[in-house]
């Protein structure tokens, strides 16, 4: 049966090269939603995040629809990029990893030191600073994941082997959730690999490698298959519908019973268990099918805009976070004495930051091209 399906859908040669509309649209939607999600998280109390619009953006849009898709399309992009040798991925991953520290300095160290200089509030600005600057976040993870995948590719690990390794990592990561070595720096740096925690709740181990490698690894394998698909309409109809149904059933159960990534505390999401990861993968594949068919009916101008936003996704991510951090932790907090805002005003702020980030990223990309950077 597998051979029949393989012959029916897949070519012996790579035929889907270049930009793929569903990937561009997925990235564009992510880029716009990022600031809304992070503004909701930053400007809403913990109690407020448990219901209504904040819950939708924090737990659903910023949950299975968020970072898993971000990392999945990164893996697909590793296949489609023009520079796709293992050495290229290794260099790109190293730049991401180092760049994550520069990024954390821009979105945390600088605004927090400014805020401390103005207010003198040690608890707000200084106490969490080490954890925020050194802690593991999605760019740190992306750099590590890309370097590891590059090494596996270099040593001729097959796509099946890559997926198998990532699933084993996910299982092991699930078993090691909640490790506390008793030292802040130990928890911070070990948290790059596994889901560490401490009693004070200060450690930021948001995207540990073992738990999250499954997304870019499976994205890479999926991209390798997608390049050979002869009929994308039929492929997505057959693949994406069952994937969406399976994901919907799993997540409905998790939401109803507050299980898995929908449990209490943010680490239920960041220290994702293997069941949640597999369901999120199903959702990723299902949503790419949705984006494929939607892209076929959207005007060319919208798809052109999507391609532009997609090409600048990492820049949009960095720019929006810096804007969010400065605006929320300095201007809003100092003026109002709190960074909490009503949901409607928070969404308006997030939308404005999204648009600003996309525009700034576009002109930054244009400037780099003119300078040949």
Image (cartoon, rainbow, N blue to C red):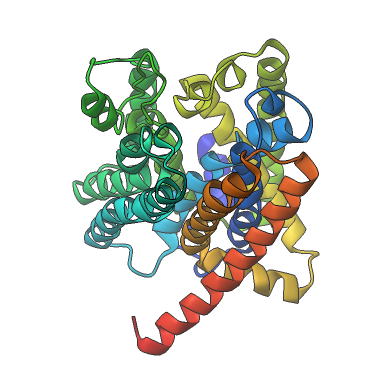
Q: Residue 330 location in percent, x, y? A: 53, 51
**Residue most toward the bottom?**
370
The quarter of the image holding the C terminus is: bottom left
**Residue most toward the left?**
155
Q: Residue at x 75, y 53 (%)?
A: 348
Q: Residue at x 52, y 27 (%)?
A: 278
Look at the image and tell me whether residue 86 can be seen. yes
Q: Residue 54 location in percent, x, y? A: 72, 34
Q: Is residue 74 left or right of residue 20?
A: left
Q: Is residue 94 above or below residue 190?
A: below
Q: Quadrant of residue 59?
A: top right
Q: How many marks?
A: 0
Q: Is residue 4 left or right of residue 108?
A: right
Q: Is residue 93 above or below residue 179?
A: below
Q: Is residue 79 left or right of residue 356?
A: left
Look at the image and tell me whether residue 16 can be seen. no
Question: Which of the pair 193/342 is nearer the observer?
Answer: 342
Q: Is residue 2 above or below residue 369?
A: above
Q: Residue at x 33, y 68 (%)?
A: 83
Q: Is residue 351 left or right of residue 264?
A: right
The quarter of the image holding the N terminus is: top right
């Amino acid at each position: 049966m597998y051979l029949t399906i393989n012959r029916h859908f897949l070519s012996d040669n790579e035929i889907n090269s270049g930009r793929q509309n569903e990937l561009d649209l997925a990235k564009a939607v992510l880029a716009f939603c990022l600031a809304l999600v992070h503004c909701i998280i930053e400007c809403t109390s913990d109690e407020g995040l448990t219901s209504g619009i904040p819950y939708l953006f924090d737990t659903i849009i910023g949950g299975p629809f968020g970072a898993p898709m971000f990392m999945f399309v990164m893996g697909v992009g590793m296949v489609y990029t023009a520079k796709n040798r293992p050495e290229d991925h290794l260099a790109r991953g190293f730049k991401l990893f180092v760049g994550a520290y520069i990024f954390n300095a821009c979105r945390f160290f600088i605004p927090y030191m400014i805020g401390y200089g103005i207010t003198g509030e040690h608890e707000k600005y200084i106490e969490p600073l080490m954890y925020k600057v050194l802690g593991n976040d999605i760019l740190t993870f992306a750099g590590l994941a890309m370097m590891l995948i590059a090494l596996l590719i270099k040593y001729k690990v097959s796509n099946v082997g890559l997926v198998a390794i990532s699933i084993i990592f996910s299982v092991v990561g699930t078993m090691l959730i909640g490790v506390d070595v008793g030292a802040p720096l130990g928890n911070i740096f070990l948290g790059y690999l596994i889901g560490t925690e401490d009693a004070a709740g200060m450690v930021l181990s948001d995207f540990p490698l073992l738990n999250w490698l499954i997304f870019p690894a499976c994205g890479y394998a999926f991209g390798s298959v997608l390049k050979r698909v002869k009929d994308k309409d039929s492929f997505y109809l057959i693949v994406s519908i069952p994937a969406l149904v399976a994901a919907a059933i799993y997540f409905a159960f998790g939401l109803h019973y507050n299980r898995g990534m929908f449990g209490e505390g943010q680490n239920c999401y960041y220290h994702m268990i293997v069941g949640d990861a597999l369901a999120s993968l199903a959702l990723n594949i299902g949503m790419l099918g949705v984006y494929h068919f939607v892209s076929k009916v959207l005007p060319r101008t919208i798809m052109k805009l999507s391609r532009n936003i997609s090409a600048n996704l990492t820049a949009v991510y960095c720019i929006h976070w810096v804007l969010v951090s400065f605006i929320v932790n300095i201007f809003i907090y100092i003026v109002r004495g709190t960074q909490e805002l009503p949901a409607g005003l928070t969404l308006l702020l997030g939308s404005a930051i999204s648009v600003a980030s996309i525009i700034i990223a576009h002109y930054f990309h244009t400037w780099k091209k003119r300078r040949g950077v």
